[in-house]
Amino acid sequence: MGRLYYGSDELLGQPAFPGVQDPTLVYYHFRPARPANLLVTRDPDSGELNLAAGTFGPLTDHPYTICLHLHSSPHSALSLSAVGAECVVALPGRDLIRETWIPALPLPRGIFEAEVAELSLLDSQVVSVPGIAECPVNLECVVEFVRDLYGRATAVFLKVVAASIDEEMLTRDRAGQIGHYPTYEVDDATNIWGGSIERLGVNGELLECPGFPAGAKRGFNSDMTAWVADLRQEGYLSEAEGAALSGWIEELSSAAGRNPALRERVTRALASAAWEEWDDLHAQLSGE
Ligand SMILES: Cc1cc2nc3c(=O)[nH]c(=O)nc-3n(C[C@H](O)[C@H](O)[C@H](O)COP(=O)(O)O)c2cc1C
């Protein structure tokens, strides 16, 4: 078994794999699952509401900003074409799969997809556009930045200015929450008529990352100095070993890329700590 390589042009068409009929089989792997949303906007000309299914990605945490990519959502793109435009990004649960699909139907401008999908509206606190009552989470947003991408899509950056959550969600444990929402657009399946049908999924498993001593006690938001201090405090490193490791790291930062031997030494030491191979780390720090 080897590894398959594709160039950017090949990615545009659905890359083929010898003997495989399903055109989505390879492409699926290059566009992993994305969180799904129901986007409520207001038509700037008519003032009518519009609902579209989409996917979004987070941009920054402080302030909380997210990004939409509108490539087949002309009505949403029109409504969000100006900085300052308002919208609600509602996050549907697994009980709303058909309701998520219906707004993606090519309904004419002027038809409010929420009515066809039999979804009800939720008053917003800050923006003038309502959210979706059946969705456990509604993010109220304001457009910060809009950019055309290659004439094929519009990237819309949104600042989240308020949010609401269904209290019922908070009665579930985390595993119960992730099994319910967010839903993700996972792949496209090809139906018997050659049509492409989106499929959604939810998370099934929580996989714990290691944490201290493979990292500082306060986690990845902490820094190298704190990690070494934590290792010393808990007896993973002696006072002298901690000082030696800190010294190497300090020296490396001033030597930048000019000392490959030191870089190699620090890499090995940090790998030993990250893999919790303490005997190896002691040996390295004692110069054995
Ligand atoms: C789960 C799901 C995710 C979708 N994600 C996107 C997306 O990220 N961007 C997009 O342009 N269209 C996406 N679509 C398709 C649009 O929802 C669809 O083209 C819709 O008719 C656009 O409506 P509008 O023109 O009223 O904005 C998605 C559809 C589904 C069902």
Image (tube, rainbow, N blue to C red):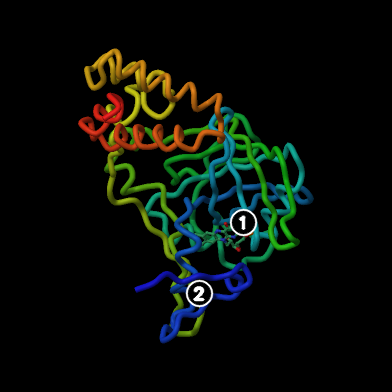
Q: Residue at x 77, y 44 (%)?
A: 82
Gap in Å between the C-alphas at discs 1 and 2? 24 Å
Position of 175 compared to 77: left or right? left
**x and y, in percent, of residue 44 in the image:** 76, 47
Quarter of the image where one finds residue 70 = bottom right
- Kindly identify which numbered label has been placed on residue 112: 1
Instruction: Say which quadrant the C terminus sits in.
Output: top left
Residue that label 2 marks = 196
Q: Residue at x 61, y 49 (%)?
A: 68
Is disc 1 placed on a helix, strand or loop?
A: loop
Quarter of the image where one finds residue 271 = top left
- Residue at the extreme front of the image, as rendered: 288
Q: Residues within 10 Å of mark 1 (few under 14, many from 20)?
A: some
Name which of mark 1 and mark 2 comes first in the sequence: 1
- Kindly identify which numbered label has been placed on residue 222: none
**x and y, in percent, of residue 164 in the image:** 48, 33
